[in-house]
Image (cartoon, rainbow, N blue to C red):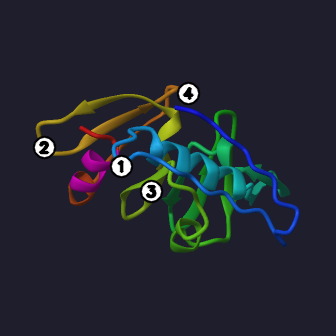
């Protein structure tokens, strides 16, 4: 794949144009990466009565626990006043909803275990784990190319 950059000082804001052969396999990943770069989003999370701003790429998952949104990172769990549907509208394609109450960052998946009951046990790189809902199984399989 060749890379060519053309600078245009007449543009009022940045614009990325990608020319590609129809069958370029990496194209979806390139687009997702560019979108992620343009969304340097910070999420406010509360820990011990202090508010922290968490980078999107540092988040393993957003999980509803006892009707409270929990933001899980490799080293801490934060709480947030946001709703899961609000978070879903602000995140990048590297995140995947696996149940009604959880969205995960696929970059932190270590491995998967397919269970006989139709769910998937998802193990993360920090040794935490979660389970998918059977309802979301087709979406998960499509997104993870299973």
Q: Could you say which disc has been placed on residue 61 in the image?
A: none
Q: Residue at x 50, y 54 (%)?
A: 93
Q: Which residue is mark 4?
A: 126
Q: Please report the bounds of the magenta region as a residue range.
A: 138-143
Going from N to C along the chain, the mark reached first, 1 or 2, is 1
Image coordinates of residue 140 in percent, x first then y, are 30, 49
Calculate the distance from the C-alpha at mark 4 to the C-alpha at mark 3.
17 Å
Image coordinates of residue 58 in percent, x first then y, are 68, 41
Calculate the distance from the C-alpha at mark 1 to the C-alpha at mark 2.
39 Å
Q: Could you say which disc has been placed on residue 102 in the image?
A: 3
Q: Between 136 and 101, which is closer to the camera in this rendering?
A: 136
Q: Is 47 colored magenta in this rendering? A: no
Calculate the distance from the C-alpha at mark 4 to the C-alpha at mark 1.
38 Å
Going from N to C along the chain, the mark reached first, 3 or 2, is 3
Calculate the distance from the C-alpha at mark 1 to the C-alpha at mark 3.
34 Å
Q: Between 139 and 53, which is closer to the camera in this rendering?
A: 139
Residue 90 as seen in the image, left or right of residue 1:
right
Q: Could you say which disc has been placed on residue 22 in the image?
A: 1
Image coordinates of residue 42 in percent, x first then y, are 76, 57
Going from N to C along the chain, the mark reached first, 4 or 3, is 3
Q: Residues within 10 Å of mark 4 (few under 14, many from 20)?
A: few
Q: Which residue is mark 2?
A: 117
Closer to the camera: disc 1 or disc 3? 1
* SS at badge 2: loop
> Which image quarter: residue 122?
top left
* SS at badge 3: strand
Going from N to C along the chain, the mark reached first, 4 or 1, is 1
Closer to the camera: disc 1 or disc 2? 1
Q: Residue at x 54, y 44 (%)?
A: 30
Calculate the distance from the C-alpha at mark 3 to the C-alpha at mark 2.
19 Å
């Amino acid at each position: 794949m060749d890379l060519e950059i053309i600078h245009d000082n007449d543009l009022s804001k940045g614009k990325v144009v990608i020319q590609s052969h129809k069958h370029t396999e990496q194209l979806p990943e390139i687009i997702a990466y560019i979108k992620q770069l343009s969304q340097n989003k910070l999420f406010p999370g509360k820990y011990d009565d202090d508010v922290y701003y968490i980078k999107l790429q540092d988040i393993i998952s957003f999980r509803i626990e006892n009707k409270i949104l929990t933001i899980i990172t490799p080293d801490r769990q934060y709480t947030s006043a946001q709703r899961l549907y609000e978070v879903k509208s602000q995140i990048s394609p590297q995140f995947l909803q696996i149940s009604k109450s959880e969205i995960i960052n696929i970059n932190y998946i270590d491995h998967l275990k397919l269970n006989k009951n139709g769910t998937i046990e998802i193990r993360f790189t920090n040794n935490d784990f979660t389970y998918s809902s059977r309802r979301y199984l087709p979406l998960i399989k499509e997104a993870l190319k299973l």
